[in-house]
Structures are given as C-alpha cells and as structure tokens.
Amino acid sequence: MELTTIWFLLVAVLFTGYFILEGFDFGVGMLLPVLGRDDRERRVMINTIGPVWDGNEVWLITAGGAMFAAFPEWYATLFSGFYLPLLLILLALIARGVAFEYRHKRPEASWKRRWDHAIFFGSLIPAVLWGVAFANILRGVPLDADHEYVGGLLNLLNPYALLGGATTAALFLTHGAVFIALKTVGDIRERAAALAVRLGLSTAALAVTFLTWTLTIRSSAAAVVLAAGAALALVGGLAAAKVRREGWAFTGTAVAIGLAVATLFAALFPNVLPSTLDPAGTLTASNAASTPYTLTIMTWVAVFFTPIVLAYQGWTYWVFRRRIGVAHIPQH
C-alpha cells in the first residue's frame, strides 16, 4: 500500500475518532438547556464530559496536523477556501472551553447562565458547520487549475451541505442524549433515555437521506457497505436505547457515526477535494501529498506515538467510568 493511501486512511481514522468522541461532547452541550432543569442538573451534565472533553479535541488537532504534514496542498486549499466556517468553529470551540473553566468561578445565576449559553452555542455551531464542511469536501468546490478556491461563502451553503449540517447536529444530539443516559442516575437519566429515542427517529430519517444523496454524488462499493452498516448500527442503537440498554445504545450511535464518516472518506477516495469547475483542479491523495521522505518519517513517528496516546485516553475513560447524579453535586 502506498504511503499516500496510508496517510489518507490515517486522516480518515483521526476525523472518525474526533466525531465519535467530540460528538457526544457537542450533544451534551446542546442538550444543556433542554435536560438541565436547574443548576445542579446542568452541573451533572457538564461533569459527565468534564474529564474528557479536552482530550477528545486532541483528535482534531492531530487530524489537522496530519493533513498539514501529509497533504499540505489539501490543507492549504481547504483552510483558505473554508476560512470563515473554520474560523467560526475555532471561535466556538474557544468560547466553549472558556465556559467550562469559568462557569463555576462565581455563584450568581446570571453569570452561570451566560456561560451556559456559551456552552450551548459553542457546541451547536461546530456540530452544524462540520457537517457543512465535510459535505462540501465530498461534493466538490470550485477550484481552478492551480487548486485555488474561486468560490464564495454562498457556494458552501448549498442544499446538500445544509442537509449535512443538519444531519451531524442531529446525530450528535442523539449521541449526547444516549451518553447522558449512560453516565447519570435518577431523573436526568430517565429524561435523557426518553429523549434519545424521540430524537433518534428524526435523526435516522436525516442520516438515511443524507447518505443516500451522498452515494448519488460519489460512490464506491466500500462506501455502499459502510453506509448500510451505519444505518443498521443507528437502528440497533436506538432499539437498545428503547429497552434501556445504555451501553449498547451508546455503542450503536458511536458505530453509526464512525461508519457514516468512513462512508464519506470511502466515497471521496482517491480525491481529497474535487473541483466542480475543472477536473485538472481536483486535489487527489497523490498530487496533494508531501514527499515520500516526509511521509516515511511521519509514519515511523505515528507507529511509535499512536499506541501511547490511545492507551492514555482509554485509561482516562476507564478511571471516570462511573455514573453520577444530583446527589454527587454539593449545594451552594
């Protein structure tokens, strides 16, 4: 297997891990005003992701770094053409991170309410815009023969991309609701479990519509199989949620998100950013890649460090695996 293919697969794996892990973070943040009926319940929800949310974002940093080093042409064109949505994602993530750290600094309800809004919008904006961005990556954007983006913001806000944004937001909401049900006890667990089932129906409809549309734009045998697997995993996860098997439900939604992201990358390959103007402008895994020497060095670094990072993050989830509830939150 060529090194360019290996690094395309690695970038796909990194983004898949990011969407699975950060997906339930975003879901919890978006559900904060929905499931949290008072401050203690909202603190329970925040505490479910408190030990892991920043570690989950490492997957995005690593994916961006891998793109920059392995496919600099892809990175440059993507970050220049998608500058505004990616900037909005960055600002939202910064606001969300600051909110997690500052929310508890003062006791006033108005102070906490403002940071709760930051958590909500800091979760909603990336949840939508990541779907918009990846839908446009697969659909293709106007690139000239020099691989330069020559479109505007409205080119990115096409119906397919907007459906992609709605789909990722819905998937993350369902994923987050299942995670809250998995990690909490008491009334909040009951409400989260019921909400996950209700959300799942519309989420399934959106996901099936988006993946079907995706396969009409670009497709491969692997993409079709992965899309079918994503649909089955989501149905299985929702069925498990309905009978209150939260562990299996979370596994189902996680696998569904993972296979959905894998579907996009499988349908995209060997392209990394198609051009809708000139086929000569299409970026592929070959013409966007770094030199073989660079890819070789990066491969050895990845082989050494990746197991260490995975082991550490797995240990973190194991340490903070217990359920929590309002009884664990002291009153102020």
Image (tube, helix red, strand yellow):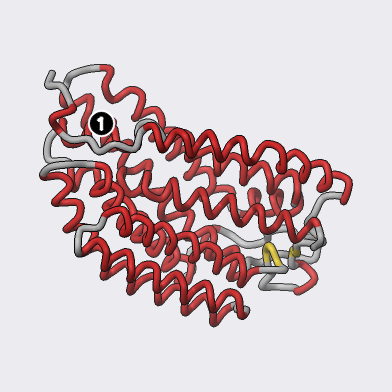
Above or below — where is 200 with respect to 227? above
For the residue marked with disc 1, what is the amino acid? Arg
Q: Which of 272 and 13 lies nearest the eye of the viewer?
A: 13
Estimate the x, y position of residue 283 in percent, counting from the top left: 74, 63
Estimate the x, y position of residue 153 in percent, counting from the top left: 54, 58
Q: Is residue 105 left or right of residue 129?
A: left
Q: Which of 143 and 243 lies nearest the eye of the viewer?
A: 243
- Count up the numbered dots: 1
Q: Which of 265 and 48 lies nearest the eye of the viewer?
A: 48
CA neighbours of label 1 inside 10 A, class few (<14), some (14 to 19), many (20+): few
Q: Is residue 262 left or right of residue 165?
A: right
The answer to which quarter of the image holds residue 183 is top left
The answer to which quarter of the image holds residue 248 is bottom left
| Residue 155 in view, yes or no | no
Q: Residue at x 28, y 25 (%)?
A: 103
Q: Residue at x 29, y 36 (%)?
A: 322
| Residue 303 in view, yes or no | yes
Estimate the x, y position of residue 119 in percent, counting from the top left: 32, 38
Q: Residue at x 20, y 51 (%)?
A: 192
Quarter of the rendering occupied by the C terminus: top left
Q: Which residue is mark 1?
A: 114
Quarter of the rendering occupied by the N terminus: bottom right
Q: Residue at x 17, y 47 (%)?
A: 189
Above or below — where is 197 with respect to 208? above
Q: Secondary structure at mark 1?
A: helix
